[in-house]
């Protein structure tokens, strides 16, 4: 899906430097930036949803001790 964006001069210069330094195409860096940005935004919204479930009592937390025991990492069990 073709998309057109306008970059400010500073971003365009930074992008050009990456292209010169690596020999990769601009589109490579634009895709990378979008993918990484999407991952960050998705993580944020997943965390927000988990916090809301926690506030509503629909989600529980576990102590480090509980997790260690469940995973068999408890030194005392050895």
Image (spheres, helix red, strand yellow):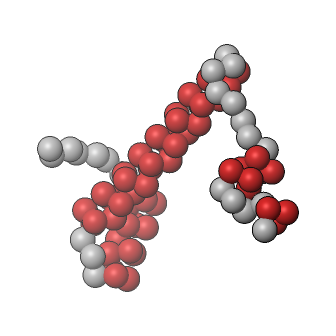
Left or right for 18, reference 56: left
Q: Position of residue 18 (x, y in %)?
A: 38, 74
Q: Position of residue 11 (x, y in %)?
A: 43, 59
- Quadrant containing the C terminus is bottom right
| Residue at image coords 39%, 57% | 33
2 over 76 or under it: above or below: above
| Residue at image coords 39%, 75% | 17
47 over 53 or under it: above or below: below
- Quadrant containing the N terminus is top left
Q: Residue furthest front?
A: 78
Left or right for 20, reference 78: left
Q: Residue furthest top?
A: 56
Q: Position of residue 14 (x, y in %)?
A: 43, 67
Q: Residue 36: which quarter of the image?
A: bottom left
Left or right for 11, reference 56: left
Q: Residue 73: which quarter of the image?
A: bottom right
Is any atom of residue 75 visible in this view? yes
**Considering depth in this image, is 20 or 49 the residue closer to the camera?**
49
| Residue at image coords 67%, 16% | 56
| Residue at image coords 33%, 64% | 29
**Considering depth in this image, is 65 or 7 the residue closer to the camera?**
65
Is any atom of residue 52 visible in this view? no
């Amino acid at each position: 899906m073709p998309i057109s964006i306008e970059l400010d001069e500073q971003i365009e210069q930074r992008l050009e430097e990456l292209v010169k330094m690596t020999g990769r195409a601009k589109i490579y860096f634009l895709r990378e930036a979008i993918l990484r940005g999407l991952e960050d935004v998705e993580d944020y919204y997943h965390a927000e949803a988990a916090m809301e479930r926690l506030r509503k009592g629909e989600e529980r937390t576990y102590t480090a001790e509980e997790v260690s025991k469940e995973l068999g990492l408890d030194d005392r069990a050895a």
